[in-house]
Image (cartoon, rainbow, N blue to C red):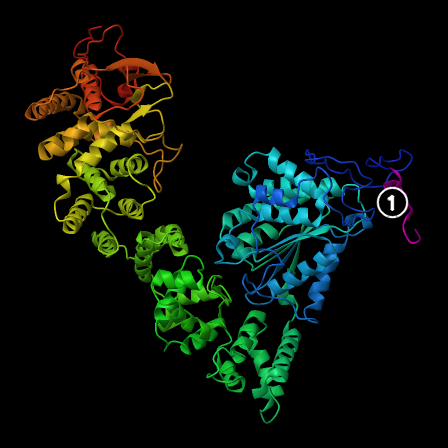
Amino acid sequence: MPGKPRCQRIVAIALRRIPGAYPAVNPTWKIPQTPHPAGPSISPASPRSSPGVPGMDSSGSERKQSTPEGEQPLSELHRILKPLPNSSHSRDRQKFPPDSNCLKGTREAVIREISDWATKSKFLGASEDSHIMWLHGCVGCGKSAIAQIIAERFFQKKRLAGSFFFFRGSCARSKIERLASTIACQLAAAVPSAGPYITSAARTHYGLLANYPLGLQFQHLVYEPLMAITKWSLFSSPFLIVIDGLDECYDRSQVARWITDTVEYFKAHPRIALRFLITSRAEEHIREGLTRPGVRLLNLADHNPMADIVFVMRETLKATASSSRVIQAYEGQWPEETDLQRLVNHAGGLFTFMSTILKFILDNSNPMGPNPMARLPHALTIDPGLDGLYTETLAHAEHLPHFREVTSTIGLLQEPLSINDLAELIVLPRHEVVQVLVPLQSIIHVPGDNYTLVTLCHSSFYTYLNQYHRSGRFYAPPSGHLDMLKACFRSLYNDTESSSSSAYAQRATEAHWKLLLASLPEEPDGRGFEAQLELLISVLQFDVLDLRDYNLVVYLGVLGNILKSDNPDRKILHSAVAGLLQGMLIESDPLVMLLELLVTSNVELPRLHRRLEQESQRRIGVPTAHWRQIPLVNLGVAAFLKRDGSGQIYPGYRHNTSPATREYICTFWLQDLLSTIEQNPAEIMEFLVETVILLPPAEPGKVGRHLEPEIDFSFQGLASDWETRLRLQVEVTISAINRLFKAENRDLPNSFKDGRWHWEVVEGVSNLVLSDPDHDSGPSILDMVLFFDQLSLCVRKRCHHEGDTCGIEESWFASRFRILPIQSCID
């Protein structure tokens, strides 16, 4: 091995000659080096014996080989990790932007600097001690193109561990949650011997992708597997991971934390054979994490791009001229050298802006439109900033039908949609949407089919459309979120199943509502709430909405009851509504979601109740109070009582139900039942004895979509004299039930006469339990009445129990209600 240092030759010989095991260090010699950090405490899913490094030759290069017996196939790893497709350098860039690459002969100095840094190994005496390079620059300066060419070249060298290209507005690629799993799958494909280690880590660390921070995900899925397979390949060049457009990721706090974790990990493990190339704008949350020791900085502003821009423009226009019959027929040179230089100066060093100008000049989507020679002077008059280009391009298409609907929708969307979904959402024929998009191809990526997402050439177009001082007559005002909200409701309530626009509406309705409310001015005199309420009523009046279920009815009933209480406090209402949305209502219902959002705003409760009652009565035709109590009564039983595995039925105050839900039911359930008996005796008669299906326990911590689960309050907030009122309510209700059965010539069940509740310790707490329940059915409304009958006696110490004692003082009720010391229990 001429030319190699003696220590290298010894290690290489040892790696080749010792079969079946990793080589041991000869005690007679040592390589001067700092101690290697402790290896990862993982083992491959299927260990195998092979000379040297599994899956690599003696120089550290990957061997081409079939999947060994026992090694997990790549498809299995994909099933476990669920990597994000179309996010690497090998994606279809026209469908999944950024569509950037360096033309041959451009950016050579920058590419050479990055390649030299990424190739050098610490064990070959390199002075470079940074595992991370941050390539940063302004919008449109060519960062993504450089990242693309670097990823492609290192892939050809078989030293690319993975790549990920973020893109703002591209849904999954604008989030960081699947970054580690995606890179890990790419690493397993690039270095098959890493696959078993990655699979083992994914299986060993339960909940790794769901519960671990991104830094630990990288440690277990990328760093430790890579260290395990390369720790004896001391002199090979490191692997490279390319992360492009990190500033386009919406998860700013997670990005900052991951940067910190990554820098700290490399500081603690300096010998790991891995490099990170990160490209982004100089956003503050990124700059703070990467401007520290251990990170190499490369500012594109230090590399003058003008020569490259001249080269790209000249070659692009020359190639077009050689193939265009129209340009060939032009008398004279095109473009003239002076015009070319003016175009170069106009681009201002921005590759993205240069590319957009070239698209504008060479746009041939409309055969009847201007030719390139006519377009070039217009390009020279556009403001060098992107705003001028956007305005000029939009002005050419603003005469088209539905131009305003399409462009405003694009500016207000929360994520990109396909042409099909865009047309379905705004109820326009598909061809008319395409007609508007085609002239905008210099600033919008218009796919060649109706199913690929419509994306922007640059994300700054979003901010342009949403800022009046920049876009002027093309401004997409926040009030447009009302139209988006109506469009979402129309999509949610239509009869089309599996609609992509409906899926978007489900995800984006809340965001459009919040953005709409945020656009309203703050009014201290209450007019601000009135404006919010009018917006909600506007949505409720939309023709596709139908009050076909009891969601709004129950909501109005709860609100009306709380307004009757001693202290209709907003805090109490919020907590009660949160519990009822969890326990009684369909939480995913968009109407319920809007009502809950409205309740958490600056609400004047009586006005809210009055307007919603008026609107509901107008839509239904009769006062909702005439028929809403039955759902309230049934759902009260379903949310209040619990049935355990042994069949016992008791108040489920220990199964994560909101305290406000339980206390609301204790206060108002008997009132609702009595009102129902008086107003709808015939309808309620059959419900009294029927079994009520109990609701399943709520998920831990789920007490409403937008409210804190810790909200709690003293019961006196609802009714300070509840203890004394309860007995009267029970007696009046039982009397009404007796009269109802007598009027209907029916006998009351024997269980109602005897009573079926007794005290027992369940779940470690004293509770009232339903005696001898029928294991094939649940409780009835009459059973719930008997529960309150027994509770009212125990609270006032006027109870009588056969064979057991009263447990009121050890129960949940003792901590919530005032136990009156009127007389002792009769045991």
- The reply to whether residue 673 is in sight is yes
Q: Residues within 10 Å of mark 1 (few under 14, many from 20)?
A: some
In the figure, is residue 529 to the left or right of 387? left
Residue 133, above or below 699: below
Apparent side of residue 414 relative to residue 5 in the rendered image (left or right): left
**Who is closer to the viewer here, 457 or 719?**
457
> Is 7 part of what is drawn in magenta?
yes
Q: Secondary structure at mark 1?
A: helix
* Residue drawn at point x = 31 percent, y = 20 percent: 775
Q: Overall secondary structure of the magenta stretch? A: helix
At which x and y percent is residue 346?
55, 78
Q: Is residue 421 magenta?
A: no
Position of the C terminus, as image quadrant, is top left
Residue 798 rendering spot, x and y as whole percentages: 17, 12
The total number of labels drawn is: 1
Q: Quadrant of residue 814?
A: top left
Q: Is residue 411 visible?
A: no
Residue drawn at x 18%, y 45% as measured from the top left: 609
Which residue is denoted by mark 1 in the rendering? 12
Where are the magenta residues, as a range? 1-18
The one of 817 and 301 positioned closer to us in this rendering: 817
Figure quadrant of residue 538: bottom left
List x then y, in percent, for residue 265: 65, 42
Say which quarter of the image contains residue 268.
Answer: top right
The amino acid beneath tag 1 is: Ala
Q: Please provide percent x and percent y for residue 108.
A: 71, 68
Q: Residue furthest left?
A: 743
**Residue most toward the right?**
2
- Looking at this view, name the residue that lies furthest to the bottom: 331
